[in-house]
Amino acid sequence: MENTQSEFGTPKPENKKVVSGIFAILLGYLGVHKFYLGYTKEGIIQILLTCLCGVGALIGLIEGIIYLTKSDEEFYQMYQVGRKPWF
């Protein structure tokens, strides 16, 4: 079982890296990974891109690979704290 508390007793924030990466690769064309990270507007844009020209699936695949290759801390700081919505 994973320890959710740091060395000093403060709770560690939830890192959504692996789940977001898998969602992006498998369901990226639907923008599921965007909704999971809390980017509702970007998730809707991703769905529209898929419906209009099909490029949403390619974006999802690329983002999934990027998510999974970042370190846990780098992913957390960039996408959960910094709220970087694209790539």
Image (cartoon, rainbow, N blue to C red):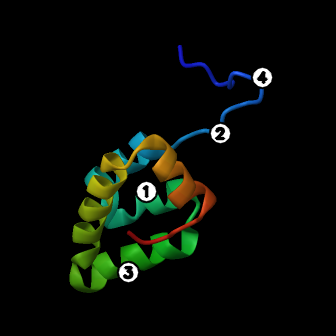
Q: How far apart are marks 2 and 1 (CA)?
A: 18 Å
Residue type at numbered disc 3: Leu
Q: Element type at marker 4? A: loop
CA neighbours of label 3 inside 10 A, class few (<14), some (14 to 19), many (20+): some
Report, in whole angstroms, how far the alpha carbon at label 4 lies from the one at label 2: 12 Å
- Foreground tag (3 vs 4): 4
Mark before the other along the chain sequence, 4 or 1: 4
- Disc 3 versus disc 4: distance between alpha carbons? 44 Å
Q: Name the residue under label 3.
A: 48
Closer to the eye: label 2 or 1: 2
Residue at mark 1: 33
- Left or right of residue 79, residue 25 in this image: left
The image position of residue 20, as x and y in percent, is: 42, 49
Number of the label disc, if any, that sits on residue 4: none
Give the residue displayed 23% in from the left and 78% down from the top.
55
Disc number at residue 13? 2
Q: How crowded is mark 2: few (under 14 residues within 10 Å), some or many (20 or more)?
A: few
Q: Which of 45 and 84 is in front in this view?
A: 84
Query: In the image, which is nearer the foreground, mark 4 or mark 1?
Result: 4
Where does the image place residue 22, in percent across and percent down from the top left? Answer: 33, 45
Q: Position of residue 67 (x, y in %)?
A: 36, 53
